Image (cartoon, rainbow, N blue to C red):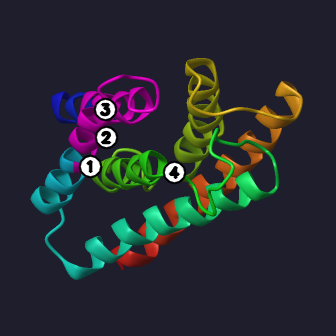
Amino acid sequence: MIRQLWQFVFFQIQWWCCLLSTVSPHYHDLFLLALVLAVYDACRHFKTPTRWLLFLLIASLGLINDTLLMHLNIFYFFDDSLLIIPPWLLVLWLCFGGWFLKADWINNNYFLMALLGAMGGPLSYFAGFKLGAISFPQPLLLTMIILLVDWLLLALTLTTLNGLCRK
């Protein structure tokens, strides 16, 4: 139980570093801290090529997913020249991948992962919206519903990939 709590707290620290790097005068420091924590965490915990591949696959899926949502105008960032999501969000996907792969208590349970994804994913973007890191051009309810469905599908996909890689 202590290990799971520590993993959750560690991910929250990473999450806050990524989000606050968008609005803080010390944004470079926070961004670099989140990146270093993500790489350190991965190097410490992922000992097999399969785990590394899955870790990078999760970050890649996040990059593709959020870039698609950005181009579909579900949300946007305050730099119109972006072709893909900003670096802080990619680092956040690395952090999420690290947390997910260590969270054995949930990452093999479709129901719990779907529930957590459907609730936690949209709430994370909403928090980013409230902090000014991201903007929602569509009505808030519509955006939240789209993100709920998106994260439900992402959670189920990641759980399936994790299960396939464990076989």
Check contact, mark 1 vs mark 2: CB within 8 A: yes
Q: Residues within 10 Å of mark 4 (few under 14, many from 20)?
A: some
Check contact, mark 1 vs mark 3: CB within 8 A: no
Percent coordinates x, y for residue 51 in the rendering = 28, 71
What secondary structure do most residues of the magenta stretch adopt?
helix
Which residue is labeled 3 in the image? 8
Which residue is labeled 2 in the image? 31
Q: Which residues are magenta?
A: 9-35
Work out how far the residue at label 4 is from the one at label 2, CA to CA, in angstroms: 11 Å
Q: Residues within 10 Å of mark 2 (few under 14, many from 20)?
A: many
In front of the other: label 4 or label 3?
Answer: 4
Q: Nearer the viewer, residue 165 or 70?
A: 70
Q: Residues within 10 Å of mark 1 (few under 14, many from 20)?
A: many
In front of the other: label 4 or label 1?
Answer: 4
Which residue is labeled 4 in the image? 86
Q: Earlier in the sequence, mark 4 or mark 3?
A: 3
Residue 118 sits in which quadrant? Answer: top right
**Element under disc 4:** loop
Work out how far the residue at label 1 is from the one at label 2, CA to CA, in angstroms: 6 Å
| Residue depicted at 38% across the width and 23% down the height | 24
12 within the magenta span: yes
Work out how far the residue at label 1 is from the one at label 3, CA to CA, in angstroms: 17 Å
**Element under disc 1:** helix
**Element under disc 2:** helix
Amino acid type, label 1: Leu
Q: Quadrant of the C terminus?
A: bottom left
Percent coordinates x, y for residue 23 in the rendering = 46, 24
Amino acid type, label 2: Phe
8 within the magenta span: no
Residue 35: assigned label: 1
